[in-house]
Amino acid sequence: MPKRREDCLFCQIAREGAYVHKGKGFVAINDINPKAPVHVLVIPEDHVDTFRDVGEFDAKESKRMLEFIAETAEKVGLTDYRVLVNVGPTAGQTVFHLHWHILGGTGSAEVPSIVATAEAEA
Ligand code: 5GP
Ligand code: ZN
């Protein structure tokens, strides 16, 4: 079972952030630098570095995580949206605590990709 870390930004935000949604073991926050009209991050309270380590969550938690993502999208008023995880720096991951991007609110299929974030910030 993954544990929280003192030196991790998203561990800290999961403890004391301004949530748009909170459930057992998971929080959702607005992205500080939104790439779509609605851009929410779903963050597990327990720390794993990347999606590669998702197996550290047990089956129940993994199911809850997926359900929480869907619940969060509904809660922020989205029916159509994109769910995205950047895995590793060359794929755009900049924060090394697993998080799921929910992007939507454009009213069209043109929800922007954020895969290029790491390059843009390099
Ligand atoms: P990644 O690039 O790792 O897939 O996503 C990290 C996301 O976290 C980025 O979209 C970035 O804008 C967001 N972010 C980074 N620092 C903060 C912060 O302090 N607060 C919030 N709300 N979002 C952050
Ligand atoms: Zn963390």
Image: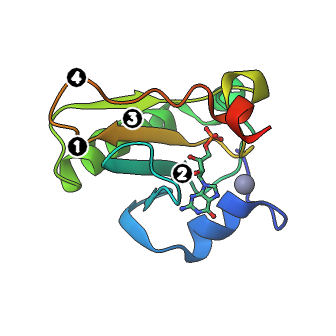
Depth check, mark 3 against mark 2: the one in front is 2
Q: Which element carries disc 4, helix, strand or loop?
A: loop
Marks 1 and 4 close (CB-CB < 8 Å): no
- Mark 3 to mark 2 CA distance (whole Å): 11 Å
Marks 2 and 1 close (CB-CB < 8 Å): no
Depth check, mark 2 against mark 4: the one in front is 4
Which quadrant of the figure has residue 110?
Answer: top left
The amino acid type found where label 3 is placed reads: Leu
Depth check, mark 2 against mark 1: the one in front is 1
The amino acid type found where label 1 is placed reads: Gly
Q: Residue 97: where, in percent of width, then height?
A: 70, 46
Q: Residue 66, labelled with which disc?
A: 3
Q: Earlier in the sequence, mark 3 or mark 2?
A: 2
Q: Residue 105, labelled with which disc?
A: 1
Q: Taking 116 as reference, is 70 above or below it?
A: below
Q: Residue 111: where, in percent of width, then height?
A: 32, 30
Q: Residue beneath label 2, please? A: 43
Which residue occupies 62% across, 27% down? 116
Which residue occupies 46% across, 40% down? 101
Q: Residue beneath label 4, please? A: 109
Q: Earlier in the sequence, mark 2 or mark 1?
A: 2
